[in-house]
Every structure is written in C-alpha cells, then in structure tokens.
Image (spheres, grey):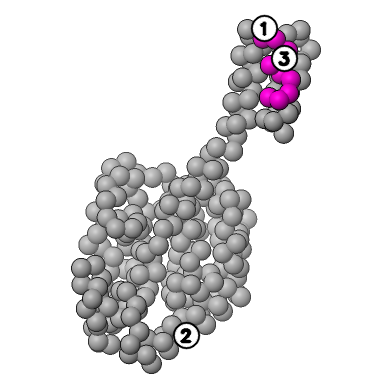
Amino acid sequence: MTVILDTRWDISLEATYRVAWRGENVRISDAAMQRITASRTSFLNLIENDPTAVIYGVTTSMGELASQRLTPEERDRHARLKPFPAATAFGDELPERVVRAIVLARLTNFIEGHAATTPRIAKAVAHMLDGGPMPRVAAAGQGGAGEILALYPLFAQLSTAFDLQVKERGSLINGSPCGAALIADSALAARRRLKLALKSFALSSGARKASIDSAKPPFCGRYARCWWGPAKGAATTRHP
C-alpha cells in the first residue's frame, strides 16, 4: 500500500501509523509537486530581484554570523555546504518507526510549498520511506539549537547525492519534525492503553469481589461501558 500526500492534512495519525509502524511507502501527488515547483520559482524570484530581502541561512549566514549578509556568490557557496559538521549526536538510537515518522513529518513542510525547497529534494525525502534501511538517529545528546543534531545525521547521506542549491539544506535540517513525530508515536502507542487499564481494573475488581456499585455510574457512564459478567461478583469493563 502507498500513502498519497496531496496536502499537509494528509499526514494524520492514521497515515503515520501506516508509514511508520506498518512500513508503507509514500508518494507525493502531482498537484503537490506542482505547488512545490511554483513555490520554489516564487522564492528564487524574490531573492534574485529584491536585494533587501533578509532570509536566515539564505541571504545571511547562520548562527553567530546571522547578521552577515551574503553576496550572490557567497550564497551559492554557502548553499553547497553538506550537513556533516553537527552530526555529532550520541547515545541509544531511536526506533526505526520513529525515524520513519520524522521523515514523514519532514514532508509536511514540503508538500504545500512552505519550505521553498526543490522538487528533487521532496522526492528524495519521500524515497527514503520506500523500504530501505533508515539512517541511525541518536535519542540522546540533542543539546543544540532546534532539532539539527538529529536532522543532520538523518539527512546527511541524502545530501551527498546532490550539489546542493540555495535553501535545500535548510529545508532538511530546520523546523521540528522530530517533536511532531515523537508526539504522534506516543499517541499511537497509547491508543490501547486505556482499554488495557480498564480491563485490568475490571479483573482486579472481580478478584476481590468488589461491590457492584463500583461498576455503576458515574464511573461507567463517564469512562466506559461496564456490566456484570456471568460469574457472580465478576465485573467486566469495555471501552466505548
């Protein structure tokens, strides 16, 4: 199965479950690719025709040198830098499903043109979800600004396939796809935990022959559907 991405709203919990947990691949729709191309064209027109435009990491340097304006020649040279220097995170690795979720979340910034990246980068990121081995991303040592210490190693290998153009590197390493992916993964992992907890409470209630009152409203009406099982004194609980 393939998850088709047309807008950012297509990257839902269900899509994350299919791509990250079940290993399905993704495809960016033709309409989305057209938006990415149009946004890229508009962005290039802006920086080429407006010398006063200030865009961090594009018309300026980065970090402590952010106040330094770049000439067109410096801009192109700056764009070709590979995302290797800060790929220094360490510690236990994130599960592969979480890494896949981060890659999927990265596409959220691409498919409606907000990142002003190129169509080739968008396709390359989507291709990372085609079933090949995922890059290793450490779960610890993330002490840098934003999420770049996780995103550098995630997309470093991909960047070696290209002579990077302006904004491409920034579109890969900026933003917060890691946080979005981790929240989504937590939500997916917690889906059945309430149901499991209710069943556990019901079993413990039956084991100690609790009063039937514990299985009556407001508990049942608010949290679950409860009823008495066939065995006298055995409460069972079902999540709605």
Report the residue that reaches farthest toward the front: 218
Residue for point 55% across, 52% down: 16
Q: Mark 2 vs mark 1: give the one in front.
A: 1
Q: Mark 3 vs mark 1: give the one in front.
A: 3
Q: Which residue is mark 2?
A: 42
Report the residue that reaches farthest toward the bottom: 49
Pinpoint residue 158: horizontal percent, then vertical percent: 37, 65
Q: Looking at the rendering, in which quadrant would you find the C terminus?
A: top right
Q: Amino acid at mark 3?
A: Asp
* Depth check, front residue: 63 or 173: 63
First-in-chain label (3 vs 2): 2
Q: Check if mark 3's residue and mark 1's residue have beta carbons within 8 Å.
A: no
Pinpoint residue 152: horizontal percent, then vertical percent: 31, 60
Q: Secondary structure at mark 2?
A: helix
**Magenta part of the chain:** 209-219
Q: Looking at the rendering, in which quadrant would you find the N terminus?
A: bottom right
Q: Amino acid at mark 2?
A: Ser
Q: Residues within 10 Å of mark 2 (few under 14, many from 20)?
A: few
Quadrant of the rendered structure where residue 91 is?
top left
Pinpoint residue 189: horizontal percent, then vertical percent: 53, 39
Q: Which residue is mark 1?
A: 209
Q: Amino acid at mark 1?
A: Lys
Residue for point 55% across, 77% down: 35
Q: Residues within 10 Å of mark 3 (few under 14, many from 20)?
A: few
Q: Mark 3 vs mark 2: give the one in front.
A: 3
